C-alpha cells in the first residue's frame, strides 16, 4: 500500500526527503534559486540563509533554504529592501513564528485545564477554605446544621 508522497521504484519505496533535509550542493541550490553561487556564499556570511554543513565543510541546502533564497531575492529586487532590512524582516518573521507556536501551546494547555476544571467541583470547607471534590463526592467532615454548603462548578468556556 502506498502512502501520499511515496515514490515507487522497482517495487520499493524510495526515500522522500522533507523540506528541511539538506540535499542540494551550492551549485544546485544557486540554480534552483536563480542566483550565482557567490551570492549564496555572501548570504551565508551575512547570516541571511545559513545552510547545513557536511563534515568536510561543504554547504548543503534544503528545499526550505532554496525557498528562503528566492524570498530574499524577491525582497531585494522587487521591493528594494536592503540586505540589513531583509535580515531584520527575517528575524521578525522567525520571532513571530516562535510566538505563534507559544500561543498555540498555551491555548492547548488552557483547553486542558478548562477540561480538567469541568471535571471537578469546588466547595467551601469548614473554615471557609476552598476544597476540591469530584462530582458526587461528599465532604469528609459534615459542615454542621448551621452551615450551608455552596457548590460552584466552573464552566468550560
Image (cartoon, rainbow, N blue to C red):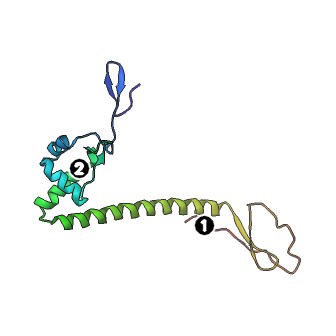
Look at 87% across and 71% down and name the residue there: 142
Residue 10 image offset from top left, x and y in percent: 32, 18
Look at 74% across and 61% down and name the residue there: 134
Total marks shown come to 2
Q: As drawn, is 30 to the left or to the right of 99? A: left
Q: Which residue is mark 1?
A: 155
| 35 w.r.t. 142: above or below | above
Residue 6 image offset from top left, x and y in percent: 34, 30
| 64 w.r.t. 76: above or below | above
Residue 26: quarter of image: top left
Q: CA distance from mark 2 to mark 1?
A: 46 Å
| 61 w.r.t. 103: above or below | above
Residue 114 image offset from top left, x and y in percent: 58, 63
**Residue 67's mark?**
2
Kind of element beneath mark 1: loop
Please tell me how crowded label 2 is: few (under 14), some (14-19), or many (20+) other residues with Cα within 10 Å. some
Please report contact status of discs 2 and 1: CB closer than 8 Å, yes or no: no
**Residue 42's mark?**
none
Residue depth check, mark 2 versus mark 1: number of the one nearer the observer: 2
Q: As drawn, is 83 to the left or to the right of 113? A: left
Residue 155: quarter of image: bottom right
Residue 20 image offset from top left, x and y in percent: 33, 45
Q: Quadrant of the N terminus?
A: top left
Q: Quadrant of the C terminus?
A: bottom right
Look at 58% across and 64% down and name the residue there: 156
Kind of element beneath mark 2: helix
Please tell me how crowded label 1 is: few (under 14), some (14-19), or many (20+) other residues with Cα within 10 Å. few
Residue lying farthest to the right in this orientation:
145
Q: As drawn, is 40 to the left or to the right of 108? A: left
Amino acid at each position: 500500500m502506498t502512502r501520499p508522497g511515496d515514490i515507487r521504484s522497482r517495487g520499493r519505496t524510495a526515500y522522500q526527503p522533507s523540506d528541511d533535509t539538506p540535499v542540494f550542493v551550492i551549485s544546485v541550490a544557486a540554480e534552483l534559486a536563480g542566483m550565482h553561487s557567490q551570492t549564496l556564499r555572501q548570504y551565508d556570511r551575512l547570516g541571511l540563509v545559513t545552510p547545513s554543513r557536511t563534515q568536510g565543510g561543504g554547504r548543503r541546502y534544503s528545499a526550505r533554504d532554496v525557498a528562503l533564497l528566492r524570498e530574499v531575492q524577491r525582497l531585494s529586487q522587487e521591493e528594494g529592501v536592503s540586505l540589513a532590512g531583509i535580515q531584520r524582516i527575517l528575524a521578525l518573521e522567525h520571532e513571530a513564528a516562535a510566538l505563534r507556536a507559544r500561543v498555540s501551546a498555551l491555548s492547548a494547555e488552557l483547553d486542558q485545564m478548562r477540561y480538567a476544571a469541568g471535571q471537578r467541583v469546588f466547595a467551601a470547607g469548614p473554615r471557609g477554605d476552598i476544597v476540591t471534590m469530584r462530582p458526587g463526592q461528599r465532604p469528609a467532615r459534615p459542615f454542621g446544621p448551621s452551615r450551608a454548603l455552596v457548590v460552584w462548578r466552573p464552566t468550560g468556556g
